Amino acid sequence: MAKPPSSTSMRKTAKPSLRLRPVAIDTYHENVAYLNRSCELYRAEGFQALSKIVVQANGRKIYALLNVVDDEAIVTGDELGLAEQAFDQLGLKAGDEVCVDHAETPASMDAVRRKIGGERLSLDDFRDITRDIVANRYSKMEMAAFLVSSTHMGLDRNEVLDLTRAMTESGDRIRWDEELVADKHCIGGIPNNRTTMIIVPIVAAHGLLIPKTSSRAITSPAGTADTMSVLAEVKLTPEQMHKVVSKTRACLAWGGTARLAPADDILISVERPLGIDSEGQMVASIISKKLAAGATHLLIDIPIGASAKVRHMDHALRLRKLFEFVGDRVGIHVEVMITDGSEPIGRGIGPVLEARDVLQVLENDPAAPLDLRQKSLRLAGRILEFDPDVRGGQGYALARDILESGRALQRMRKIIQAQGEIELVLQPGKLIREVFAERDGMIVSIDNQQMNKIARIAGAPLDRGAGVDLLKKVGDKVKKGEALYRIHAEFNADFNFAVSLSEQQSGYRIGDEHEIIRIDLEE
Amino acid sequence: MAKPPSSTSMRKTAKPSLRLRPVAIDTYHENVAYLNRSCELYRAEGFQALSKIVVQANGRKIYALLNVVDDEAIVTGDELGLAEQAFDQLGLKAGDEVCVDHAETPASMDAVRRKIGGERLSLDDFRDITRDIVANRYSKMEMAAFLVSSTHMGLDRNEVLDLTRAMTESGDRIRWDEELVADKHCIGGIPNNRTTMIIVPIVAAHGLLIPKTSSRAITSPAGTADTMSVLAEVKLTPEQMHKVVSKTRACLAWGGTARLAPADDILISVERPLGIDSEGQMVASIISKKLAAGATHLLIDIPIGASAKVRHMDHALRLRKLFEFVGDRVGIHVEVMITDGSEPIGRGIGPVLEARDVLQVLENDPAAPLDLRQKSLRLAGRILEFDPDVRGGQGYALARDILESGRALQRMRKIIQAQGEIELVLQPGKLIREVFAERDGMIVSIDNQQMNKIARIAGAPLDRGAGVDLLKKVGDKVKKGEALYRIHAEFNADFNFAVSLSEQQSGYRIGDEHEIIRIDLEE
């Protein structure tokens, strides 16, 4: 069946054009356009609210969801309003003439429908899908359809490989002109766990290149980029990033400015709120991002624990195989470490509190959280062993030497200065409440998800000093009435809500030593 | 894991309330709320654009998608703006105080995630899902996730049954206090095919109760409600509908005013644009609507043909079994007729042109389209045989007698008057273009989808006179240069676009008699 001509050349003569007007509404990751109901075009075309339109001018083109406006103060009958994101994307000036048309369903939705019907998709199918997603041709619900169709047993490992390739090709790719570019990634879910800010200076001090980009928190109380931003500027242009890396062999930047595997960012904006959890999507997402960032060697951290994302060893092992399968075929050396995710790593949860922990470790402060220090050294050691000159099994000792000699701290200072230092005020939130033990005993478990939730409700990461400060960890003995942790907040409402949440469920379980569940890990 | 308290009672004291302000933006089936970026609440809560919020006051509650506004002219820092749909739904006045909170993901999304993971769902799961959908707790992408998870082999027949029950319970139910309430439904896809407006007066003239509600077109050039609205008022309140039915034993109303199986309407607003096609959803949708409308006996029309929704007999038979299985268990007598869907039924496509065809049949006009007349009589005959007093096999003759005696036309006039007559101006669109045969031969096929598309692009159903008027049907002989059909439009731009579409592909194939594909049907 033929489709109507999608070119507007023919229509330009027949259709009135509209004047572009920015509308100061932030619609987040979705393009929205506003048309007055009296608009001649609206009338003739039978445009309906929530239909998808294509806006064109001067060879530029964007897709947007249409909202119909009944108020001339927002848009008049001969204007087309665009919400902030859509206006920026089109890149024209207010008052410029634009043409508007119905947007056809993206052609690659045929492939999605085939996937829903149980078919395997090809590399070309995944390329078509990611291209359409990056061009903003997919609505949120079309993306949800794609994600659900490829969840769980929906993608075989060759499809995950093809999806990885297609997502990598969907954006820019950084080249570092070095043989070995190291990177690390944790699949997430564990509070604090801020190892990256310790590993990167260690690895760079040894001389390996490790240009690290990280995300900001979306559903957690802090991402590495949030915590690093307490100490230094993290929003770097690609040029600034290259400059920092050439000076220090490393960076700790926010990944949001580069256009690396952009299809992935867009899909994540649908996947997270849906809370669907697709192994294939996750592996494709992580590897495509790292490939696009120019990494040649990648260490993946998979924490397992009762309140972690991965709860059983067989699941972790299955994930590891999938990472290895895809990594080998796209030419990135992937190693996977399965780590203890049974409780938070470190003490602070929230940007300022986590930055304090990181600095304590780097400064070899005797008060530094030991678990954060040891995990960081183990991961850093494995990365150092990517270096052919480092003997197998010597990485940990080498990493420890770099840390204890103060070279890691020195390198971190250099990175901070190169990125732009921020005047250091490590001030935790001024509203403070301690949560107390209800009985004598030993801490037998701490719920990762509950601690994340309390810290987030307290205001993290938006309020940098907000969060939770753990005073006791699993294995510690406590007396009834002893403080387990402190809640910090900046605003009354958030504070009260976080306190009330901790009263409902503290997240701590106190019992006897034999109740502690230890996970058998490779070392 | 505990969830934060969802009651706002605790927060009311801590949180500032906001003044409600209507925002004149039509967001169609989605609730949207607008908050100024300077709003203290926004600041403290870390609300993000596109997060879902819950708005409460005076025991009323709605869910809405949040957009952040940077313009005081739209909303100020102490106001909460609501788009038209959301404002209407909340039912408060401008300036009323409201409280705003983060909306948690609807609890029934757990069931959707289990379905994605391959589990069977229970009746309670489907009840929870439909309840949350009707309460507008689901975003479009959450609905897409549910739909895709239950597509194709995703629902077994017992799940379809449970979904039907849950959807039926999701809204009101009309009771007619009669033993036999007849209804009919066609699964759609065939242009014109306006049998309902002929069947209903025939069945009502015989004395059976047939209170018919129909939809407006969403993706087609006309629905029964669009065509009927050319002749009579179709937007009836439940009270008006009862009055019309008590006077005439029938009605031909738009179903959109009643709250019948509302979960279905909301799901359709996602399913149609996605173009995903789930048998289970379709069967549950149709039967729940008819049950809620009070039908006891239902005739389903499944047209099959190369450009129809159902293309093969085995598919039609599978669907029939599913309709029968569900119908028997929810206590509605369902019969399925498989009909010829190889070309449009009737001549006109678009509200005015279809109304003309219907009136010609009812008036026994010798020019009336024979296929529309015959199909209507066959379907009406089957419905008449629901009457225990009608001998099996006599329905067709009985229906023909009622039509030929003028009693059907008389009854139709009565229905029109009872609903509210509209002054009759059957004026097809004034811009007219004929499309000509490119060779001598016989019409061997007409593409249903292409004819629908041309009629829709020409302006139907919004412009009532717009559409396509078929001058030749399958089996007709034509000479080169003879007219095949006429395009009618009201507006230049639409007209040019429809003409250009027909030039790309006329939708007609001319060949030799043996090329006509006949479908073997039960009679």
Image (cartoon, coloured by chain):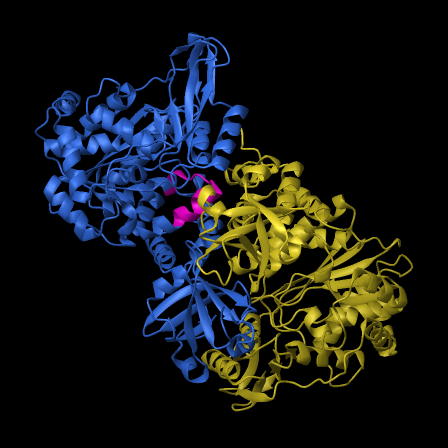
Chain colours: A blue, B yellow
Does residue B264 appear anywhere in the picture? yes
The residue at the point 21 percent across, 24 percent down is A377
* Quadrant, the C terminus of chain A: top left
Residue B113 point in image, percent of width and height: 52, 39
Q: Which residues are magenta?
A: A267-281
Residue B237 point in image, percent of width and height: 78, 63
The image shows residue B136, relative to residue B110, as above or below, that is: below
Q: Is residue A420 left or right of residue B344?
A: left
Residue A418 point in image, percent of width and height: 15, 43
Residue B310 point in image, percent of width and height: 59, 60
Q: Residue furthest front?
A: A430
Q: Residue furthest right?
A: B389
In this view, the residue in front, B198 or A335, is A335
The image shows residue B220, relative to residue B144, as above or below, that is: below
The residue at the point 61 percent across, 75 percent down is B462
Judged by its main secondary structure, the magenta piece is: helix
Q: Is residue B185 left or right of residue B248?
A: left
Q: Is residue A459 left or right of residue A396?
A: right
Magenta highlight on residue A276:
yes
The image shows residue A450, relative to residue B331, as above or below, that is: above
In this view, the residue in front, A175 or B405, is A175
Quarter occupied by residue A374: top left
Count of numbered badges drawn on the protein: 0
Does residue A3 appear anywhere in the picture? no
Quarter occupied by residue B489: bottom right
